[in-house]
Image (tube, grey):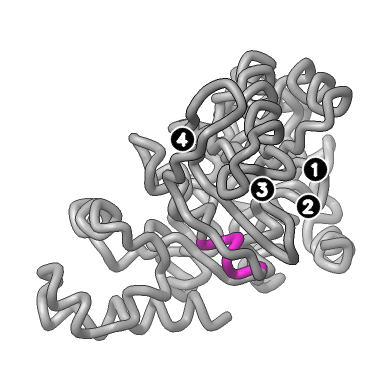
Amino acid sequence: MQTYARGASSVAHGYGAQNIGSVLITKADGEQEMFVPTKLDNSLARVGVGPDMRKRVIDHVIRELKPGMTTEEIYRHAFDILRREESAPMAARYSIKRAVFALGPSGFPFEQFLAEILRAHGWTCRTGAALNGHCAPHEVDVLAEKSGRKIGIEAKFHNDAGGKTDIKDALYVHARYEDLKKTTEESSHVDEGWLVTNTTFTHNAIRYAQCSGLTLLGWDYPNGRGLLPMIEEAKVHPLTCLTTLTEGEKRQLLDNKIVLCKSVQSRHLLDEYGIRPGRIPQVMEEAQRLCGI
């Protein structure tokens, strides 16, 4: 991550207040902040976009920049240029965060995707596990085991970037997993509980978790060890990253518990789910290039 940041800064160098002024943009949670070109540059560099293309994207965004423009609008400008002028996999990689939101609206595909991320990191996982606590039964979104350690995970999915997981969720999850720690049923016992979200946590949720010993995992929390680094390290991209599938085709695959782009590198599977034969090579090529990077 640090290597990308150093390389990226040279591309965005020179885009300062003298060029764009003090332009405030609106974040997903409604807060406003100064537009800083290096942030956009770093996000593009992280997914492998080259210096020339990064400069073109930043130049375009600065030309279109208006006070109050949302981060979603800035992302859309960048994505459209990548999709139009770069290879499809580059646009798909840049869209990972949005692709995770597109796993919704129910949240169930997010649980499946989370289990796939953990499997890629060496965990054995199952979803929707029914366990008996000391005081009450519980359904665990993801039950993960590795090296004799058993983790119960509550997956808190948000459909938009402005959603935050708050202290109420942390209190609830901590109580559930304390109950499962105390059970006398060996098959239901867990060693610890995790609360995982695809967005962020409130300050009070983080404060409570640090005090109580509850593990939190968010999109970029803890710093450098959140969901995004785990996805990038394991190369487990959600199929919703693919630009060659329609929204309806993606939904049909998700409804059948197919959540990874690497799972659609099969001509037979694509044919089975009604992808037109003439489009199958294009979908397979994008999936192969995206997952193989």
Task: Tell me the quarter of the image containing the N terminus.
Answer: bottom right
Q: Amino acid at mark 1?
A: Pro
Determine contact: label 1, label 2, CB under 8 Å.
Answer: yes
Residue that numbered label 2 is attached to: 225
Is 88 displayed left or right of 264 in the figure? right
Along the polypeptide, which appears first: circle 3 or circle 1?
A: 3
Q: Which residues are magenta?
A: 116-121
The residue mark sitting in front, 3 or 2, is 3
Most foreground residue, 285 or 202: 202
Q: Position of residue 60 (x, y in %)?
A: 57, 51
Circle 4: is it few (<14), some (14-19), or many (20+) Cα within 10 Å?
some
Residue shown at the point (47%, 72%) measured from the top left: 89
Can residue 67 be spotted in the picture?
no
Per the image, is 249 magenta? Answer: no
Residue that numbered label 3 is attached to: 151
Q: Position of residue 133 (x, y in %)?
A: 58, 30
Residue that numbered label 1 is attached to: 222
Q: Is residue 269 above or below residue 156?
A: below
Classify residue 53 by image quadrant: bottom right
Classify residue 235 by image quadrant: bottom right
Q: Amino acid at mark 4?
A: Glu
Q: Amino acid at mark 3?
A: Ile
